[in-house]
Amino acid sequence: MLKMLAGFWGKVRAYLFPSEEKASPQQQEDYFSLVEQARLEWHKAKDAFDQVSDPELIDHAVYNLEAAERRYIYLLKKAKEEGVNLYGAERGK
């Protein structure tokens, strides 16, 4: 009975506090790559938006900018939920 309760409370704690769980090094690297790619796409969309001069292309530039921003924010949130620390460790070492 105690083992069942301990398992249950472990699952509840993991659900309520997902950032306490640590992701594997491979997960960390995968999320870092995805988030970095999304960040670069977002900056590229910002640059494209800043350079648009044709009124007919402004809607397209706004759509791309918002989509890239939302993807970046989504991936940041998802990484946090999975317990991935994107900013604590330096990459490439």
Image (tube, rainbow, N blue to C red):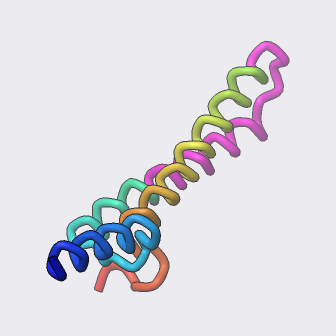
Residue 21 seen from this side: yes
Residue drawn 29% across the image and 60% down it: 30
Secondary structure character of the magenta stretch overall: helix
Quadrant where the C terminus sits is bottom left
Residue 51, placed above or below residue 23: above
Residue 25 seen from this side: no
Q: Which residues are magenta?
A: 36-57
Residue 49, placed above or below residue 28: above
Direction from residue 19 to residue 47 in the image, left or right = right
Direction from residue 18 to residue 54 in the image, left or right = right
Residue drawn 73% across the image and 30% down it: 62
Is 67 within the magenta? no
Residue drawn 46% across the image and 84% down it: 88
- Give 4 or 88, whichever is nearer the viewer: 4
Direction from residue 56 to residue 14 in the image, left or right = left
Is 52 within the magenta? yes
Direction from residue 34 to residue 25 in the image, left or right = left
Q: Which of the 4 image quarters holds residue 8?
A: bottom left
Q: Which of the 4 image quarters holds residue 84?
A: bottom left
**How far across and how far down the image is residue 81, in percent?**
43, 63
**How far across and how far down the image is residue 86, in percent?**
44, 73
Q: Which of the 4 image quarters holds residue 79?
A: bottom left
